[in-house]
Amino acid sequence: MATQSSRATARLMVAPSVILLFIWMIVPLAMTIWFSVRIYRLLSPERSGWAGVRNYTWFFNSPDFWMAINNTLLLVGGVLAITIILGVLIALLIDQPVWGQGPLRILVISPFFIMPPVAAMIWKNLFMHPQNGLFAAVSRAFGTEPILFLQNYPMSSIVFITAWEWLPFATLILLTALQSLSSEQLEAAEMDGASALSRFRYITLPHMTRAITVVILIQTIFLLGIFGEIFTTTQGGPGSASTTLPYMIYKQALIAKDIGRAAAGGIIAVILANIVAFFLMRSMGKHLDA
Amino acid sequence: MGKIVLKQVRKSFGDVHVIPSVDLTIENGEFVVFVGPSGCGKSTLLRLIAGLEDTTSGVIEIDGKDATALPPAKRGLAMVFQSYALYPHMTVRKNIMFPLKMAGMDIEAATKKADAAAKVLNLTSYMERKPGQLSGGQRQRVAIGRAIVREPAAFLFDEPLSNLDAALRGNMRLEITELHQNLKTTMIYVTHDQVEAMTMADKIVVLQAGNIEQVGSPLELYNHPANAFVAGFIGSPRMNLLEGADAQAVGAKTIGVRPEHLDISTTAGQWKGTVAVAELLGSDTFLHVNVEGHGTMTVRGGGDVNLRHGDTVYLTPQAGKVHRFGADGKTMA
Amino acid sequence: MARSVSTRRKLFFTVAAWSVALLIFFPVLWTILTSFKTEASAVASPPELLGADWTLQNYSDVWARSDYPRFFMNSVIISIGSTLLGLLIAIPAAWSMAFVPGNKTKDLLMWMLSTKMMPAAAVLIPMYLIFQKTGLFDTRTGLVLALMLMNLPVIIWMLYTYFKEIPGEILEAARMDGASLKNEVLYILTPMAIPGIASTMLLNIILAWNEAFWTITLTTVNAAPLSAFIASFSAPQGLFYAKLSAASTMAIAPILIMGWFGQKQLVRGLTFGAVK
């Protein structure tokens, strides 16, 4: 749909973005690959040389690694499940005829604007703290022992906090999708004798598929890299109970100061992320007419 | 002046040859309609003339000068798009003035010209509105106004009426025809609606799969279609095309009879059938008749034809009104 | 909905929706309230609401204890700088992908988005070294660059989505009307794209403002923005709830208010074209 000259101009205009992103991706990646096959410890700089695949095997042999993979999947899956299910329900609720839909939307979107370390700190101290937190006060009011959220349920607590941050995003996108559904379709289904539940199942939900797809895609991208929430709340603990893959790499790099191992972990994370990306993009591609 | 000549113009998108090769001459001041089913390449041909697409090979001449490599703005043509393509953030006046502004005309002269165009098109009281506040017909007129002020060598219309309702479409058809009579500028008009083609054109170009099937005046095409495709495409309701023994009897692969060229009788005739549906329009009656051995045939009778579903009728083609087509689809002499 | 709704039904849904919304908003509200309490009142059990000791002391304490204006200015410069630079690079790219799409455009977009899938922690050390070597470490320029590149795929996607909605015929009309590429961009594209560009800008400022990995790991003092400011308050936990709340409020307030004003445009842009 265009002439030769406009095609040439177009290439020229995309070029800066592509080149910059390529450099941004390839340079650190190449360096990480290099480090990952080297012995490189900040605490013992006199030892250096080839490590071969030892940095990698260390990761695969570490029980923490499989736990970290598990925790990463738990975090992504848990947050996706909570935000989408609650998001659909809340969107359905707000889409009903209510007074003050504008202010309602403002309240609901607010957590999205909160900086992750602030969000984590609020939840950790003001709510989940075993002595001074609001949850503890509620427990005491009911005469039960305060729950040690971050001690005993670290992963669930982090999933909860992260889900709170991302719920607005899911809700508002699903709400926008819901509002673009023509009421004629629903009325036609009603005339056809569909109950409220089957109207939701056969009309509303399919209509929202594309929006749900976007929510999954965007959230997964951000959730795979979650760091601040863990850093602020549990530091990956107790033990390694809430260590995700990115956090484990961070610990290797900045606490154990073993750059070689951290780099190997980084490459493993990149490969895993790319596997996820591949499947995600392939299924998304069908729904997004780019 | 707007004589446009296409010489062996070809257009391919990758391996797809949308326009295999077209030769066509459009005389100055002619109203030419490109007509054909969707996907026949008529819009592509128009966009090639406009310069919105590159030609793969061939030459496009405008006023005797080779314009093949010229960008759209330099060709001196104006186009009215199917979606009107008005600039939503500009008022009607600014929309109409935009091409003049781009040509570097001073504001005063441009305003005067826009106002004159608006007067012709009955838009004077809408000049300060934005396109979003106008009806479909008004938007269409703004798009035409924007084309008029440029005083182009030729106007290009890309299915301009397809987004309007039937009544408005009839009105706009008349307005565009009148406009052509007043301006006497070359117009090239693309449509898939053969009624628009018949009523507006000086010359119709029938396209199929990127090839020109026939070029001629509306009545030439109606009376002497070059082949079965043109015969079937021009005329409403469609021509009845029959094969088999009846065709072989006159030495043809296919014969064609227009609905208005069949005589109706309740007693005797060449083909016997039963009325499936009778459409009563008051002035005319269209009968859809199930004819033994030929399927459904359409017949046009007067408003006084009193036949209903299930009635038996006999149909006879009028003498000299049977078109004969050979095995290659071409009309036989 | 051309359907009348009974007042009772509407009242029921209003109460239900507002309850849910307030529940979601409550942590933010509670933080803001706590920031105005005395330290004793902030940790009182049972929690005090109406009977609390209200004070502005926390804000003046936080203000005195740390160099808030510097953190704030760094946040402003980094988020706005990275956004403007990103737009400068992204607008031509998104423009050409939207209006001159090739058969690889979709793959290109997906590839761009996939660069965001690389976990930041994985490339922390190389980035750290590159920043040290190039003298970008702990500079605003360095963070502007890093955050710009980090968010570039999202900016391009959002702009692409918006540009896609501008009908191609309008640009062709402009071309027929004699507009040069420059005039086409100036008079037609830009005015039509401004709402989209504005909401892209807003989202990107929010993302950059709230970024808390590179802004903390690639700065020490000079270029540290509000994310680092808040991190410095996490140490004396439990003791200074009210001050922590005041600092939190100071870190989130600017972007929260900005987000409230722009939320409608923002949400539409975030659908990435999945909702028409």
Image: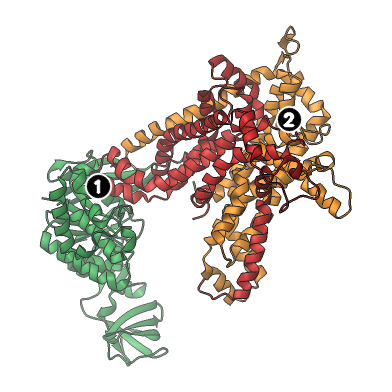
- Identified by mark 1, the residue type is Met
Residue A217 to residue A94: above or below: above
Report the disc number at residue A35: none
- Identified by mark 2, the residue type is Ala
- Colour red maps to chain: C
Foreground of the two, C58 or A212: C58
Per the rendering, the colour in which chain B appears is green
Q: Is residue B222 visible?
A: yes
Report the disc number at residue C235: 2
Residue B31 to residue A273: above or below: below
Q: Is residue B34 visible?
A: no
Label 2: which secondary element: loop
Apparent side of residue A97 relative to residue C26 in the rendered image (left or right): left
Foreground of the two, C137 or C8: C8
Marks 2, 1 in one chain:
yes
Specify the quadrant of the image occupied by residue B270. Answer: bottom left
Mark 2 surroundings within 10 Å by alpha-carbon count, few (fewer than 14), some (14 through 19), many (20 or more) = few
Residue B278: % across, % down: 37, 85
Residue B297 to residue B30: above or below: below
- Colour orange maps to chain: A
Q: CA distance from mark 2 to mark 1?
A: 65 Å
Report the disc number at residue C176: 1
Which residue is depicted at the point 11% across and 62% down? B182
Instruction: Tell me the chain of label 2.
Output: C
Instruction: Tell me the chain of label 1.
Output: C
User: Looking at the rendering, in which quadrant would you find the C terminus of chain B?
Assistant: bottom left
Residue C37 to residue C64: above or below: below
